[in-house]
Image (spheres, rainbow, N blue to C red):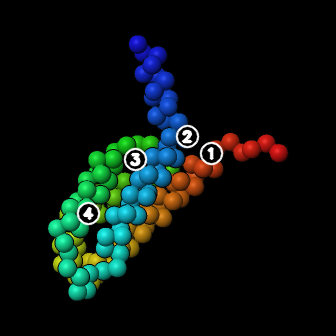
Amino acid sequence: MAAPQKASMKQLTSLDNRISVLNQYKNLWQEYFRFFADGFDDRKITPQEEQAFFQVMNTLATNHFRFVELAGDVFKGGDQVQEILTETVSLASIKQMSEAQFGKLCIDWHTVFINMNKALGKLNLQRPQPKK
C-alpha cells in the first residue's frame, strides 16, 4: 500500500505539478487584485461583488498552504500573502482604507505578484532543455 502513496507524492511534488499549482495561484492572485485595482472613488460595492471577492479570498486562503509548500525555496512571500489577505476582509474594508493604507496594499500586492513570477521563472529554468 505504500507504493501508491509514494507514486502520488512523487506526482504531487513533480516539477510540472509545482509549476501548475504556482501558476494557478498566481492567476487567482491577479483575479483578487482586479476587484480593487482601479480604486473605489464613487463606486458602489454590490453584494454580488462582495460575494465574488469573498470566494476568491477563500480559495486563496484554502490553497495557501499547498502553494507555499510546493513553491518551496523558490518563493519567500508566504507570510506576506497571509498578511495581505488578513488586511482585506472585504471590499468595504478596502474602500474605507486611507490613501496611504491603500497605496501600501497595492505595493505589497505587486511585490508578492513579482515574487510569484520570479518563483515560476526559477521553476521553469529547472525544466530539461530540449536537445538540439
Query: Given the current orientation, which residue lies at the most extreme top position?
Result: 1
Q: Which amino acid does label 4 sit on?
A: Phe
**Alpha carbons under labels 1 and 4: distance apart:** 34 Å
Q: Which of marks 1 and 4 is nearer the N terminus?
A: 4
Which image quarter: residue 107?
A: bottom left
Q: In this view, does 58 lie to the left or right of 126?
A: left
Q: What residue type is labelled 3?
A: Phe
Q: Which residue corresponds to mark 4?
A: 53
For residue 21, above or below residue 100 = above
Q: What element carries label 4?
A: helix
Q: In this view, does 6 lie to the left or right of 130?
A: left
Q: Is mark 1 on a helix, strand or loop?
A: loop
Q: How many marks?
A: 4
Residue 76 pos. (x, y %) = 43, 54
The answer to whether mark 3 and mark 4 are in CB contact below 8 A is no
Q: Give the numbered dot on residue 15.
A: 2
Q: Which residue corresponds to mark 1?
A: 126
Q: What residue type is labelled 2?
A: Leu
Q: Give the numbered dot on residue 76.
A: none
Q: Earlier in the sequence, mark 3 or mark 1?
A: 3
**Alpha carbons under labels 3 and 4: distance apart:** 20 Å
* Circle 3 crowding by C-alpha within 10 Å: few under 14, some 14–19, many from 20: many
Residue 27 pos. (x, y %) = 43, 58
Q: Is residue 66 visible?
A: yes
Q: What element carries label 2?
A: helix
Residue 31 pos. (x, y %) = 37, 63
The answer to whether mark 3 and mark 2 are in CB contact below 8 A is no
Query: Given the current orientation, which residue lies at the most extreme bottom position?
Result: 42
Q: Which residue corresponds to mark 3?
A: 67
Q: Earlier in the sequence, mark 3 or mark 4?
A: 4
For residue 50, above or below residue 45 = above
- Closest to the camera, between mark 3 and mark 4, is 4
